[in-house]
Image (spheres, helix red, strand yellow):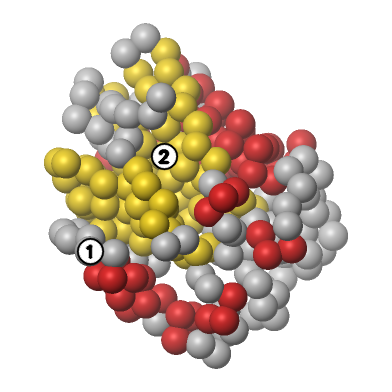
Amino acid sequence: MLNTRYSVEHSTLILRFPKPRRVLSSAVLGGGLRSCNFVLNHQIPSSLRGPERQVFRNPSRYLRTVATALGLKGRGVGLMTAVPMDRLVCVRREARNLWVEGFITVGTANAVRAGDPATADLPVSVGTINIILVTNVRLTSPAMVEAVQVVTEAKTATLAEAKVFSKVSGVLATGTGTDATVILSGHGPRVQYVGTHTRMGALISRAVVDGVLDGVRPQSPTAK
């Protein structure tokens, strides 16, 4: 049972929050450190995935249009993916009074290794790994940054375990060229540190490892 209120509507994952939450993200809509009322992860229709389309020329504007069409109000954070929402992975990990819930979509057609040569020659159906984490604890700003670090370490370790290779260099991938991470702080006990030595860091790591491993298992061509 998940605490976070979510739904999937019109190929879009929507997380709604009765009270605004602090969020740190690399999202194309509402990225950075701010507060938000909702988060969405929108599956782009195949007819709009060409690099010349408006979706890629102005993704923030496109996602604002999606949010309006869905009736979402307030400040939002928005992500895009080619992964069908029936491949959405939802995970929950908890210990004592701490919990983390993850909403993860995994595509790997765009897999790369950090340090690969930069290239604009992306697949038409761009694969990406979107990781949204929600917690009940009140994270300090440094802790939110540290959480992004832990997410990245856990994701990279999992891709190595799953033997996902870079489409550019052919060596083990560390992520994709379009990954996005969203960390949503809660209203509970204050937590200052979430490194891998901490209980909170272990929960984040476990949620990401389990979620990405589940999501990277054999996919349909449209999810890659």
Q: Is residue 182 visible?
A: no
Q: Residue at x 32, y 29 (%)?
A: 3
Q: Residue at x 67, y 37 (%)?
A: 213
Which of the marked residues, 2 or 1, is nearer the chain's N terminus? 1
User: What residue occupies the far front of the structure in this picture?
Assistant: 10
Amino acid type, callout 2: Leu
**The one of 129 and 151 positioned closer to us in this rendering:** 129
**The one of 207 and 65 positioned closer to us in this rendering:** 65
For this view, does 223 lie left or right of residue 183? Answer: right
Rendering quarter of residue 222 = bottom right
**Vertical comparison of 159 with 206: above or below:** below
For this view, does 4 lie left or right of residue 149? Answer: left
Residue behind mark 1: 71
Circle 2: element type = strand
Q: Classify the position of the N terminus by image quarter.
A: top left
Circle 1: element type = loop
Measured as percent of width and height from the top left, residue 88 is found at 54, 47
For this view, does 181 lie left or right of residue 214? Answer: left
Q: Residue at x 77, y 47 (%)?
A: 218
**Vertical comparison of 53 with 64: above or below:** below
Q: Is residue 73 visible?
A: yes
Amino acid type, callout 1: Gly
Q: Residue at x 19, y 30 (%)?
A: 187
For disc 2, the neighbor class at 10 Å (few under 14, some 14 to 19, many from 20) is many
User: What residue occupies the far top of the structure in this picture?
Assistant: 96
Residue behind mark 2: 133
For disc 1, the neighbor class at 10 Å (few under 14, some 14 to 19, many from 20) is few
Measured as percent of width and height from the top left, residue 203 is found at 48, 24
